[in-house]
Image (spheres, helix red, strand yellow):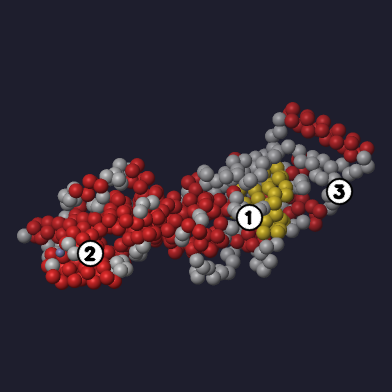
Amino acid sequence: MKCEDFAELAAELADGRLQEVAAQQRLHAHAAVCLPCARSLAAQENLRQELRTYADWTAAETAAPRVKQELRTAFRAQLAANITPGEPVKVATVLPFVARKQQVVPRWLAAVAAGLAIVFMIGALWLGRTPALIAPDTAIVPPAAPLWTPPPPEFNATAAAPETKAVPVATTRQPIRRRSGQPNAWQERETASDFVPLTLAADERALANGTLVRLEVPRARLVALGLPLPVESGREMVNAEVMVGDNGVAYAIRLVQ
Amino acid sequence: MVWLVSSTQRTGKPVAHCLTMRRLAPLPARPLANESDEELLRRMLTGEEEAFEVLYDRREGLVYQFALRMSGSAALAEDVTQDVFLSLIRHGHQFDAGRGKLAKYLLGMTRNRVLTLLQRERSFVALTDEDEDEDLSLPASLITHEDPLLKLTRAEQTETMRQAILALPLHYREVLVLCNLNELSYEDAAGILSCPVGTVRSRLNRARGLLLDKLRAARQTAEQIVA
Ligand SMILES: [Zn+2]
């Protein structure tokens, strides 16, 4: 073996990565009769130990806690924006949601809607069915309290949220027609939990023209979000409503039963 | 199916009032600590925040330390850590377990991000220029004036090694960090670096030789200063 060949494999030998026993024996045999190569091998073994020590001593170096906090915020925002990546979620309802002020509807649109309503009601009466339109203002809920508790100052939700995608349904603010045959008394039978925030910051302007989206989601998903549900039947689909601002960000979710 | 309903009709109170409610109490912890990285990722992608927490706690050091060892900058390493995990949150479904472990995938993302940021900061040494390693001059930062007896404290030894590694050309530095500090196999390192195993082997050998030279030079210079 030449010294050049030895130099090529000395580090590998020192690291214990040289698998071939015959090669190991050749290297050791050369080092036994060649002082420079023996010193080279000793230096490599010493360096190996120093690198291990360095790795051990720096193994506890970690990023600042704020990195995790910001990622957690981003995780929640992502979760809200795309409730179940890889799993189907049925979007059952899109409800207009107006928090601070009455929804502004262009006059021409209101006129068209009113016209359509009259035509439809006449048609429905003629067919002997229940009128199926609900006036838009029944879906508008004026607020009684501040929209949101301000987030802690250390959180920078905007840093994590800009790429947040809208909930994968088109938000619609046009009058929505209820399918005929839908029971009329269902609203009174339903109860809803409190909203659980999905982000740490809220944009009041976005919420003012936001939308309430009804989803069917696996029960386990709501449990993971912190909603008070029994854990056992995680695969069962339950109704939930997500409050989505007009910027596409989902701000809160609640269970509807 | 489309329903219309007023929130006040159903809940008896306005939506905005509900918004001010406090966050609900956390659920009892589930045993996730023994799950594999890949299972944690799968559960994270189905929305389990706890799976994200466990996965982050387990792998943050891998990402952060690689970035720190490659760049020498804690700020850059934190940026990289954030970018890598953010990418995992948003695009984690792109991970293909058939192509390797998640830890390797994370290191690959980390390496790409580090190189991008280092390039942006113009402290970048051309990756493909094999002649760059001929410059063996000692960076001023390698010279320590603080320990005349050369009995370096742990912190000083760490810093000497850190600076010596940082003085390596990037293509040697990354292979040394991967193979000797992260203890990756040549094959895994080759996968992350997208190069043949033989290249990893030869670069590591060269990196080790250069590192020995730099450490030796640093200690000799320190001795001369003392003398
Ligand atoms: Zn020899």
Q: How far apart in space, not on screen, are marks 2 and 1 (Cα)?
A: 52 Å
Measure how far apart labels 1 and 3 are at the Cα level: 30 Å
* Labels 2 and 1 positioned on one and the same chain: yes
Which one is nearer the viewer's eye here, B85 or B7? B85
For the residue marked with disc 1, what is the amino acid?
Glu
Along the line of sight, which residue is nearer the eye, A53 or B146?
A53
Which sits earlier in the primary sequence, circle 1 or circle 3? 1
Q: Is residue B134 above or below residue B23?
A: above
State whether discs 1 and 3 lie on one chain.
yes
Task: State the residue lying farthest toward the left.
Answer: B227
Given this view, does label 2 or label 1 mark the residue nearer the observer?
2
The residue carrying mark 2 is A10
Reading the image, the residue beneath label 1 is A87
Q: Is residue A196 visible?
A: yes
Question: Of discs 2 and 3, which sits in the foreground?
Answer: 2
From the viewer's side, name the closer residue of A188 and A62. Answer: A62
